[in-house]
Image: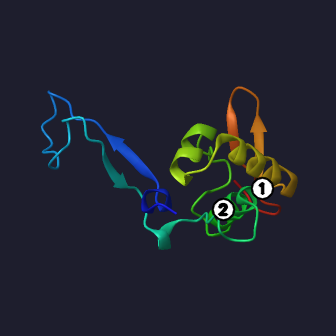
Amino acid sequence: MHAISRYRYRLLYAAVWSSVPLPDGAGRGVATYVPLMSDDQRPVDPARPVYVWKQVADHIAARIASGELRPGARLEGERELAQSLGVAIGTVRRAVEDLRERGLVLTVPAKGTYIAERAGENP
C-alpha cells in the first residue's frame, strides 16, 4: 500500500497571485499533497470489516447523538460530505438512505437533507 493512499489529500496548485509561501518544488510541475486528517481522526477506515457506507452513517448518527448536529439543521451536501470524509458520493448516498430509514434525517428534494426532530423534543 502506498503511503499516499493512507491519507486524504488535497492537491495544492501554485498561483502567481498567491501570497502564501509554497513548499520547495511546488509550482514547478511537482504536486504538493497536504493531509487533511491523520489516521486517528478519520471516521472511516476501509480496512475495517464493516461497510464504508455503514461507517459513514454511524459517524453522522454519532454527531447527531452528541448534539453537534441539531434537529432542523441542514446536513452538508453529498459532494461536500464525500470530500470531507474521503469517500465516494455513492457511499454518502447509501449512508443518508440508511439514516432516513433510521428516522434520523429527512430529505427534501431539491432542498437538501435535514436532521429530523427527535420524538418528545420541542424545536
Image coordinates for residue 87, horizontal then vertical, percent: 61, 50
Q: SS class of the residue under badge 2?
A: helix
- Image location (x, y in percent) of residue 118: 77, 59
Q: Is residue 20 left or right of residue 98?
A: left
Q: Residue at x 85, y 58 (%)?
A: 102
Q: Relative to the observer, which residue lies in front, 87 or 100?
A: 87
Q: Which amino acid is tagged 2? A: Ile
The residue lying toward the viewer, choosing from 11 and 55, is 11
Work out whether mark 2 precedes mark 1 in sequence or the reverse, and give the earlier one: 2
- Residue type pointed to by label 1: Leu
The one nearer the camera, 47 or 62, is: 47
**Going 75% across and 67% down the picture, which residue do you hit?**
50
Give the image quarter of residue 122. bottom right
Do labels 2 and 1 touch, CB within 8 Å? yes
The residue lying at 70 percent from left, 63 percent from top is 55
Q: Picture coordinates of residue 63 (x, y %)? A: 62, 63
Q: Disc 1 on helix, strand or loop? A: loop
Q: Residue furthest bottom?
A: 40
Extreme front residue here? 1
Identify the disc placed on residue 104: 1
The label shown at residue 64 is 2
The CA distance from mark 2 to mark 1 is 8 Å
From the viewer's perspective, tell me whether residue 78 is left or right of residue 30: right
Residue nearer the viewer, 3 or 63? 3
